[in-house]
Every structure is written in C-alpha cells, then in structure tokens.
Image (tube, grey):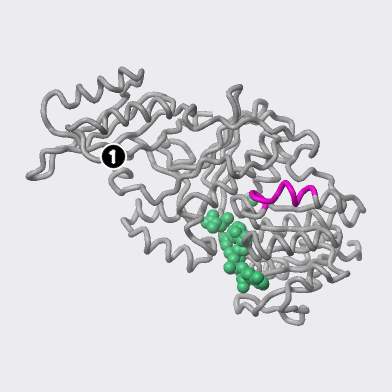
Amino acid sequence: MTSQAVKIGICGLGTVGSGTFNVLSRNAEAISARAQANVEIALVGARRDNPACDLGDTPVSRDIFEVARDPQVQVLVELIGGTGVARELVEEALANGKHVVTANKALIAEFGNELFALAQQNNVVIRYEAAVAGGIPIIKALREGLAGNRIEWLAGIINGTGNFILSEMRDKGRDFADVLAEAQALGYAEADPTFDVEGVDAAHKLVILASLAFGMPLQFSSVYTEGITRLTPDDVEYAEELGYRIKHLGVAKQSDRGVELRVHPTLIPEARLLANVNGVKNAVLVEGDAVGPTLYYGAGAGAEPTASAVVADIVDLAREISVGQNCRVPALGFAADKLRDLPILPMQEVVTPWYLRMEAEDRPGVLSSITAIFSEHGISIEALIQKAPAAGETRVPLIMLTNAAAQGNMDEAVATIEALDSVSGEVARIRVEALDG
Ligand SMILES: NC(=O)c1ccc[n+]([C@@H]2O[C@H](COP(=O)([O-])OP(=O)(O)OC[C@H]3O[C@@H](n4cnc5c(N)ncnc54)[C@H](O)[C@@H]3O)[C@@H](O)[C@H]2O)c1
Ligand SMILES: N[C@@H](CCO)C(=O)O
Ligand code: NA
C-alpha cells in the first residue's frame, strides 16, 4: 500500500459527523487500501463532543473555521447543515484551495452554481453524494454510470423522514406527530423538520438530480413543492381500495415542452417497486434512452448510511489527490460551459391522471352533474367509488380516478364542481404516476 497520506478535516459532529468519524475509524484499513492513500483525520471542528463517537487523540477545535484555515487539511468535510455558517465555511475552504465534501442538499440546491464556480476557480472540487438519498450512490450513478444516456425522466422517494411517517401511519395506524418525533430522535429529520414534511428537503434533492440528469444549472426556485401534511388516512385507505399506494415523490421529466420539476404526494400502482419502498428507505427510478429503467434503493437517512456516502466521496478525492489529478468529473456531470438553462414547464401544463375525493349529496342527478362537468373539460373517469352515507348524513364521499389531464384543465373543472350546491368543501386532489418505464 502507498504510504501517501490524504488529510481531512471534519466540521460538525452531529448525526452524520459522528457517523462519518466512526465509519472512517472502523473501516480505516479497507478505506486506505481503496483510496490508495492513508486517509487521516487531521482535525475535527465541533462546538462540543458527541458521546456517539470516541475521538481518542484526534485533534479537535471548537472553532470550525480553523479547519478551513489549517494548512495541512486537504479535504474539508462539511456536516453542519443550513446555508448560513456552512456556506461561509465552504467558501473559505474553497478559497484556501481545499476540496469539500458535504451532505448539505440545501447548500448545493440553493448555492451550488456559485460554489461549483468558486471551486473551479480554485482548482478544487465539491463532492455531495450524501446530499441526495443518503447512502444510495445516486449521484455517482447519474454522473458516471449513466453517462452514455439521454435521461428521459426520474422519479424518487427522496425524503426518508416523510417515507417513514407515511409507512408507519399506513402500516400501524400511528399518529403523524408521534412518528415525526421518532424520526427526529433517530436522527433522520432536518434541523427544521418542516423541511421534511412540507417537501422542501425533497425539492432540494430533486433539483440536484434534475441538473445531473439533464445537464442544466440548479434552479431550486422552479421546483413545485407540496408536502405530506394535507394527506388524510381516508385518502390512504381509498387509494388502496383502488389498487394504489400513496408515496411522496420527486419527479423530473424532460420533453420538447420543457422540464417538469415537481415534488408532491402521488398515487402509485401497488405492484410497482417504488410503491413498496417503506420506512426510512429511499428509491430513485431513472429512465435512460439506452439503458431503459434503472432503480436505486437503500437507506435515505441515518448516521452510518449517510456516512457511507460521505466516506465514498472522501475515497474518491483521496484517489484523485494520490495520483495528482483534480476535477476528473464535472460537478454536475456535464462540462460547466455545456450546461443549458432548459425551460421549466409551468404546472398548469403538467399532465397526469388524478385521484379526486369530494363530499356530495346522495341523491339522483348529483353524480351525473359532476361527471358532465368533467366530460365538458375532456376529462374521463376511469374508476369511481361511492361510499355509503354515515348514519344521519346526506352527503357521501365520492372517490374518482381520472385519465391524464393538464392541471390547468383540472383546476377549471374542480372550481366548477366546488361551486355546485350539491358538493361541499374542497375537492381533494392527488396526482397519479403509472411509473411504467
Ligand atoms: N441526518 C441524516 O440522516 C442526514 C442525511 C443526509 C444528509 N444530511 C445532512 O447532513 C448535514 C448534517 O445533518 P445532521 O443530521 O448530522 O445534523 P445534526 O444537527 O445532528 O449535526 C449538525 C452539527 O453541526 C453543529 N453546528 C451547527 N451549527 C454550527 C455552527 N454554527 N458552528 C459549529 N457547529 C455547528 C451542531 O452542533 C451539530 O453537532 C445537514 O446538511 C443535513 O441536511 C443529514
Ligand atoms: N432529513 C432527510 C435526511 C436525509 O437527507 C431525510 O429524512 O431524508
Ligand atoms: Na447519495
């Protein structure tokens, strides 16, 4: 084995930081053999110790910026999170000629374009495998393994906390808040868990995947984002009666009309593999023109699964450093000057089938007036369930699956239906994806 050393500095010793330290220590021999260099932790920057890891005699600074300034550190590993201090830290490290490894999807999604340019100016690179789908090597798959393809679309369950909540609610009838608290205790959730349940975290990840897939600069503000907080147990149950599971998906598709970038709850036919991805597991389905559909599955969050991805990036960088080669793979998989600002398709023009649920009067003529409105908008009903009225109730839940319709068209039909006296409240809507790649 070569005796060359590659020196890293770890900033942040929380869930992922401690997991990274532990994996690097436990698997040190295999990691150095793979890296063709001894990977040494030169300095840890942490405000406090973490009982989850024993730092031994590893040097520690309570000021994380010391890591960015330490001349012996070649790779700074940012595991702080957020776009404030973490951004300053990464900028300082890059300016000081250090490579950066990060698990921070918010930072990459929102400031990646600027940070990648800064890295290039300084002849260093930023690696971010842990930022998307935790331990699944999806960045590497898109950037390297699928480099021969035109990627047509991808769809993924890319938030572990949200999938854990949906799975526990469905399988065990548990309460939303209770499962979220458990996800936080297990270290799955973001510092602000509304990022998980309102879809922001998935949007951060989706925009990264879309840029890698389609060769475009990151456009976080263009992602349509809807979380899981408005889903009801009834919807989960009715979807199952229709042969579907509800999953929170990120979807990116490119066509002549533009790029779709959307994060929302989705009905998926129950036989699809993605419909059966449960708990904290993530999965990303990628359709390439040459390879066809490919599926990537594994733990989407948690200390060591995420550390697995962080360490893989460290190994990649150590390999490059040890052979004196930098920037072998462009940050977004395409040469920076070949990225194209593809137009994003407005949601009004996005076409999908729909699941609809409404409360309607249980009397003759009501159903036909509703279906007439759909047919006037060119929308046909593919399946319909009418529930029996509860005791003393004159209204019944009506559940429908429609054929594919543009959101704009569906908005108009739904507004007309909501205005009917025979229908009360809002019509609940969830998109359907066949995922038959
Ligand atoms: N937890 C996961 O499963 C997971 C998975 C993938 C990616 N990530 C990402 O990894 C990063 C870290 O997440 P985590 O779950 O380990 O968070 P965490 O809260 O457990 O750890 C963050 C650490 O950073 C420290 N920190 C925060 N602000 C600081 C500051 N100003 N100066 C010094 N230290 C500071 C905190 O004290 C804490 O120890 C985030 O970007 C997160 O999105 C987390
Ligand atoms: N909070 C994130 C961590 C992994 O990125 C999740 O639950 O998926
Ligand atoms: Na990953």
Quarter of the displayed picture in which ligand 1 can be seen: bottom right
Residue at 28% across / 22% down in the picture?
373
Residue 407: where, in percent of width, then height? Answer: 43, 29
Quarter the C terminus occupies: top right
Dot 1 lies on which element? strand
Q: Quadrant of residue 287?
A: top right
Is 165 placed above or below 360 here?
below
Quarter the N terminus occupies: bottom right
The extreme left residue here reads: 392
The extreme bottom residue here reads: 57
Residue at 53% across / 41% down in the picture?
250
Let me know if residue 166 is in the magenta part.
no
Our reading of the magenta stretch's main secondary structure is: helix
| 108, 284: nearer the viewer | 108
Residue at 70% across / 49% down in the picture?
112
Q: Which residues are magenta?
A: 108-117
Tell me if mark 1 has few (under 14), some (14-19) or many (20+) residues whose alpha carbon lies within 10 angstroms of its own.
some
Residue 153: where, in percent of width, then height? Answer: 59, 32
Q: Amino acid at mark 1?
A: Glu
Q: Quadrant of residue 410?
A: top left
Q: Specify whether residue 305 is in view.
A: no
Find disc 1 in the rendering and name its residue. Answer: 426
